[in-house]
Image (cartoon, grey):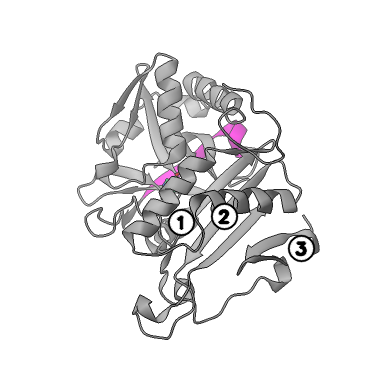
Amino acid sequence: MAEEDQWIFLSGEFVRKEDAKISVYDHGFLYGDGVFEGIRAYDGVLYKLDEHLLRLYESAKSIMLDIPYDVVEMRELVVDTVRKNDLRDAYVRLVVSRGVGNLGLDPNSCSTAQVVIIAEELALFPKELYETGLEIVSVATRRNRPDVLSPKVKSLNYLNNILVKIEANLAGVPEALMMNNEGFVAEGSGDNIFLVKNKTLYTPPGYVGALEGITRQAIIELAEEEGYVIKQEPFTRHDVYVADEVFLTGTAAEVIAVVKVDGRVINDGKPGPETEYITERFRDKVKTDGTSVYGEEIEVG
Ligand code: PMP
């Protein structure tokens, strides 16, 4: 999409990308004080928009951030942003920062929260990696402790995840896994992890420190419908190395196979059959569960 064609919702109106600028006194910029969501539209349907909005408002409540729109208005604004940009397939970034304040930490200096909505086309990983699968590594950076900063709050404080990404870059791989303080696998820098072993799916429970992703929940529900056994229990890197299959899930990442972890080859280095089946079922479902952008009827899946 050409820059001059892109419209961004900012400070209550749509502005062109080149004009979408915020103050250096915004506490989102100064302190990472705010919350956000990433939402995808598939062929004109904003997948699980209401679930994303619920998480946004719960995150905001948790950090005592007043969003200046109610959820119905916000749903409309997200839909309008996709429509204004004439997109059917889109990644939407919805950011609510504490807004402009003074240089002190005190959020009381910020009078109104700032809402920004960006919609564009985005594939998180290069297209061919969705066919071949990813090589990943585990890194030394530990997941923030959930009793210090709850992963349920999807805040603008992503330094923990950025440190993971830096380690992935240094290792020359597109994504990396972080452990929690006890050495149990938590998640990737921006996605959840699943293992397949003897037809059972494993994913770490929220208390290990992972964000309980909306895609993760969708995969759990879909897999249950398909008769898989799902176990949400802590596991270690060893369990990842000896899994039959490994895959990652997330709104930006979607569902993507992992074929090598710390040099250990998974499923002969190819995306496995269960991962492929689950990915296919996920792709079938994404247009059947969400909010229509262009008022078209949604086929129920
Ligand atoms: N973990 C982290 C740290 C993330 O940033 C994301 C992306 N929101 C996920 C997991 C996946 O969550 P979801 O499926 O809700 O996008």
Instruction: Give the number of the mark in front: 1 or 3.
Output: 3
Residue at position x 63%, y 74% from top?
21
**Crowd rating for badge 1 (residues with CA inside 10 Å; few <14, some 14–19, many 20+):** many
Q: Report the amino acid beneath label 3.
A: Glu
Q: Quadrant of the N terminus?
A: bottom right
Residue 179 image offset from top left, x and y in percent:
29, 48
Query: Could you tell whether 213 is left or right of 208 in the image?
Result: right
Instruction: Give the number of the mark in front: 3 or 2.
Output: 2
Q: Earlier in the sequence, mark 1 or mark 3?
A: 3
Q: Which residues are magenta?
A: 129-138
- Farthest-out residue, bottom: 103
Task: Compute the Cα span from label 3 to label 2.
Answer: 16 Å
Q: Earlier in the sequence, mark 2 or mark 1?
A: 2
Q: Earlier in the sequence, mark 3 or mark 2?
A: 3
Q: Report the amino acid beneath label 2.
A: Arg
Task: Compute the Cα span from label 1 to label 3.
Answer: 27 Å
Q: Residue tagged by mark 2?
A: 93
Q: Closest to the observer: 145 or 139? A: 145
Above or below for 6 versus 229: below
Above or below for 16 versus 100: above
Task: Compute the Cα span from label 2 to label 1.
Answer: 19 Å
Residue 155 image offset from top left, x and y in percent:
40, 59
Residue at position x 53%, y 49% from top?
72
Label 2: state its secondary structure: strand
Query: Could you tell whether 45 is left or right of 135 in the image?
Result: right
**Crowd rating for badge 3 (residues with CA inside 10 Å; few <14, some 14–19, many 20+):** few
- Which picture quadrant has residue 290? top right
Q: Report the amino acid beneath label 1.
A: Lys
Q: Residue tagged by mark 1?
A: 165
Give the numbered dot on residue 3.
3
Above or below for 164 versus 208: below
Residue 168 image offset from top left, x and y in percent:
46, 53
